[in-house]
Image: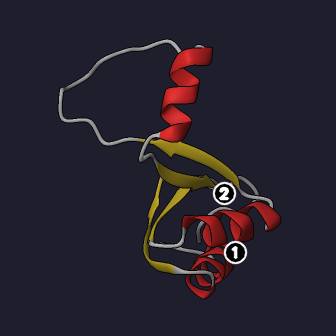
Amino acid sequence: MSSDCINQYYELARDNGAIGGKLIGAGGGGFLMFYTEDKTRLRQAMHCAGLRELRFRLDFQGCRFFRSNGHKEDEFNNSKALSGWHIPDCPPFI
């Protein structure tokens, strides 16, 4: 399922270095995840379009909880984190 709004964000990402992407979530919002080798270019385009980045990492140790603090935040921002882009302003899927 998609919408014109989501398709426009996907095309913007593809035009700015994304090799491919995945829509996740439900309802009128959700997230777009992209694979790119030029993170800086993609991040700039998505931020300029008003999307909010959510960085994450894949973990193979199972479910764990952690609390974010200054030191962990710095570690996380400097790691090989992946990014998803929150898309809150799209109309609901039809």
Left or right placement of residue 40 versus residue 24 in this view: right
Q: Residue at x 30, y 18 (%)?
A: 64
> Where does residue 74 sit, x and y in percent of width and height?
57, 28
Under mark 2, the amino acid is Ile
User: Can residue 36 be seen at all in this image of the molecule?
Assistant: yes
Secondary structure under the numbered disc 2 in the rendered image: loop
* Residue picked out by circle 1: 5
Q: Residue at x 51, y 52 (%)?
A: 83
Q: Earlier in the sequence, mark 2 or mark 1?
A: 1
Q: Nearer the viewer, residue 83 or 51?
A: 83
Assess disc 1: are there few (<14), some (14-19) or many (≥20) residues with their C-alpha within 10 Å of its C-alpha: some
* Residue picked out by circle 2: 87
In the image, residue 85 above or below residue 56 = below
- Residue 21's disc is none
> Where does residue 71 sit, x and y in percent of width and height?
56, 17
Contact between marks 2 and 1 (CB within 8 A): the answer is yes
